[in-house]
Image (spheres, helix red, strand yellow):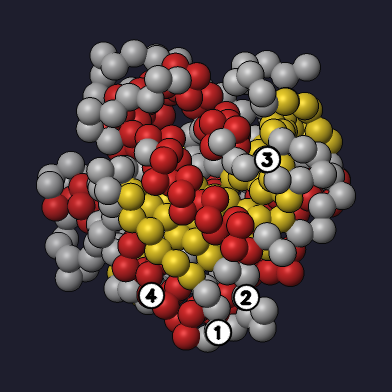
Amino acid sequence: MTRLPVTPGVRAEMVTTERLTTRVLFTGDPDGVPVLFLHGNVSCATWWEQTMLRMPEAYRGIAFDQRGYGESDPEALVDATLGLADMSDDAIALMDHLGIDKAFVCGNSLGGVIVWRMMMDHPGRLLGVVQAGPGSPYGFGSTHDVDGKPNYDDDYAGSGGGVINRELVRILGEGDRSTDHPMSPRSAIRMLVWGPGIIPDWEDALIEATFATRVGDDGYPGDFVASPNWPYFAPGVKGASNGLSPKYLDDPQRMIDLEKKPPVLWIRGAQDLAIADPAASDPANLGHHGLIPDYPGPEVYPPQPMIGQIRHVLDRYAEAGGEYREVAVENSAHVPFITHPEPYDEAFHTFLEEHRS
């Protein structure tokens, strides 16, 4: 039995693979073309339910709670030093357990960075890639320019678990589901994820799913260490937020060098503040506005152009023989698959049909 409620039409099971025991959601015909969904940070498989239910009949939707989130085994931790390979390998292990040779994969935010890693490590298992508001292939924090130059070569200060707002972590741990504090999960999600003036009609279920995040040094946001470099913290070794540090992520050149390249649909919100140039929570942006003290200026710690980095990598991917399409959903923020389903589905379903065989 699973604990978190699901939308009618979605089936939930606890599944044990060679790597992880976790909750897995299913929609559609078990013999349909598989589409595997990977959720973002501070969420779980719940966030994909409506997207899965809207897929054409020929497809089978599969989403799972990744380690550290939802109803995954609380003892299964993320070794950040592997650069999200833990989570990429979990996805492949689930495909193996379900007897799936190849699948479409769709990732949002953190899930998108895991998908970049799946492209590097397991390209032959992917029918196609849908990047729905993904993070940069260079991770989050402490890089600049479109080719991901590090701000600091020694310790990648300004990335990892220390980037996460401490008030958000505290309130998440206390279980505050209100909007009484500007950094409560609901307040932060309304500002950065849904976008101004947009509240999904199933927001309560989505917010409830965020509170299934494992909070602490072993989970979210993970640990961090002191640094002599501004903003005076560097990545630790535990949790997915540290796994997003460019200190640990593999070089995106590995995708560009693939002999066989899966096709890519990159679909994003045109008004996304979470993945932007720069992101709202980029330490350089926060420092510029006085929210992190002692900002040394862009000469020392430049902002990260996340959209520019994604586009640069995908342009090089295409020049090397790959295929990608970029779609920007107007008036949408970080999760167009939730807030703007019609334009999202038009691009998503078209891509599936074009590449299913």
Give the amino acid type for the residue marked by disc 4 in the picture.
His
- Asked which secondary structure carries label 2, the reply is loop
Give the amino acid type for the residue marked by disc 1 in the picture.
Gly
Lower position in the chain sequence, tag 2 or tag 1: 2
Q: Mark 1 and mark 2 in contact (Cβ < 8 Å)?
A: yes
Alpha-carbon span between mark 1 and mark 4: 15 Å
Residue 321 marker: 1
Alpha-carbon span between mark 2 and mark 3: 27 Å
Alpha-carbon span between mark 3 and mark 4: 35 Å
Nearest the eye: 145 or 319: 319
Q: In percent of the image, x 78 and y 17: which residue is there?
A: 1
In the rendered image, which residue does mark 2 sit on? 261
| Mark 3 Cα shell of 10 Å, populated few (<14), some (14-19), many (≥20) | few
In the rendered image, which residue does mark 3 sit on? 57
Give the amino acid type for the residue marked by disc 3 in the picture.
Glu
Lower position in the chain sequence, tag 1 or tag 4: 4
- Asked which secondary structure carries label 1, the reply is loop
Residue 312 marker: 4
Nearest the eye: 214 or 113: 113
Q: Mark 4 and mark 1 in contact (Cβ < 8 Å)?
A: no
Q: Mark 1 and mark 3 in contact (Cβ < 8 Å)?
A: no
